[in-house]
Image (cartoon, helix red, strand yellow):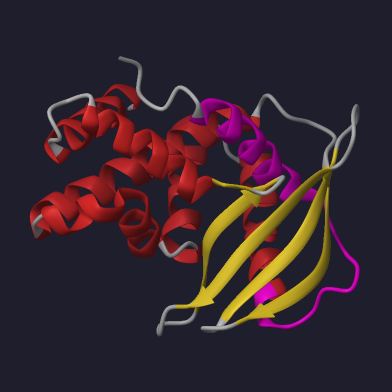
């Protein structure tokens, strides 16, 4: 049973969005949430320009760890299964997800070129949540709408979700992860072991 089959399409688009940060054009965006996206943009453009292979992957992992609220995203992705895990499982799960994400993004950076990301409005939501709207402008085809969810987790602003044409990456993970767990006897460990194996193979 292939893991994350449906998610590959979203991941390809997300990688394009991530790579598109290398040429950001700010319009009506301002404030700390927009500044976070712009900071990530500066880090990504430096990686794309100067790093390849393992060094690029390590750089992307650092961006994910510094600018994304990974514990929150992991909890949301596992949904009700999160409460079935212990501290060791949660640590293993988070580590494996970050490694697999970093590897996937590092590979896909080379498949994109010429896109630009136009940052638009910042919409405030309850619970210290901001939505930074943007468009990924492609060399061919229509622009892709991308919304970056940014929240204050008590330790500063972090990106907590990315919605591509209204499709949430966190919810896509939740669907695929839950499907995998259901197909393997309801055991969260099965998913964690699979992600660990993929992360190890990617090295």
- 137 left or right of 190? right
Q: Position of residue 55 (x, y in %)?
A: 47, 39
On the image, the x and y values in percent for residue 7 come to 50, 31
Q: Residue at x 59, y 27 (%)?
A: 9
- Give the percent coordinates (x, y) of residue 50: 64, 42
**What's the magenta region?**
7-33
In the rendered image, which quarter contains the N terminus? top left
- Residue at 67%, 65% in the rendered image: 37
* Residue 59 visible within the image: no
The prevailing secondary structure element of the residues shown in magenta is helix
Quick check: is 22 in the magenta stretch? yes
Q: Position of residue 165 (x, y in %)?
A: 72, 45
Q: Quadrant of residue 134?
A: bottom right
Q: Is residue 78 above or below residue 66?
A: above
Q: Which of these two is toward me, 179 or 36?
A: 179
In this rendering, position of residue 55 left or right of residue 45: left
Q: Please report the residue visible at 43 percent of the width from the left and 65 percent of the height from the top.
A: 69
Snapshot quadrant of residue 32: bottom right
Residue situated in front as seen by the camera: 158 or 131: 131
Q: Quadrant of the C terminus?
A: top left
């Amino acid at each position: 049973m292939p893991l994350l089959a449906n998610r590959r399409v979203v991941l390809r688009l997300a990688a394009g969005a991530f790579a598109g940060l290398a040429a950001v054009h700010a319009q009506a965006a301002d404030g700390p949430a927009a500044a976070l996206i712009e900071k990530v943009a500066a880090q990504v453009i430096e990686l794309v320009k100067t790093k390849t292979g393992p060094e690029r992957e390590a750089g992307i992992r650092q961006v994910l760890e510094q600018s994304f609220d990974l514990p929150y995203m992991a909890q949301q992705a596992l949904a009700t299964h999160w409460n079935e895990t212990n501290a060791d499982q949660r640590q293993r799960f988070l580590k494996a997800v970050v490694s697999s994400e970093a590897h996937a993004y590092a590979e896909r950076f080379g498949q994109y070129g010429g896109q630009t990301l136009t940052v638009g409005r910042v919409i405030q939501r309850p619970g210290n949540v901001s939505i930074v709207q943007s468009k990924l402008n492609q060399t061919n085809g229509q622009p892709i709408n991308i919304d970056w969810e940014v929240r204050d987790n008590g330790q500063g602003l972090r990106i907590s979700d990315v919605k591509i044409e209204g499709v949430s990456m966190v919810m896509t993970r939740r669907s695929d992860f839950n499907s995998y767990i259901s197909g393997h006897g309801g055991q969260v460990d099965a998913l964690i072991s699979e992600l660990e194996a993929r992360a190890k193979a990617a090295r």
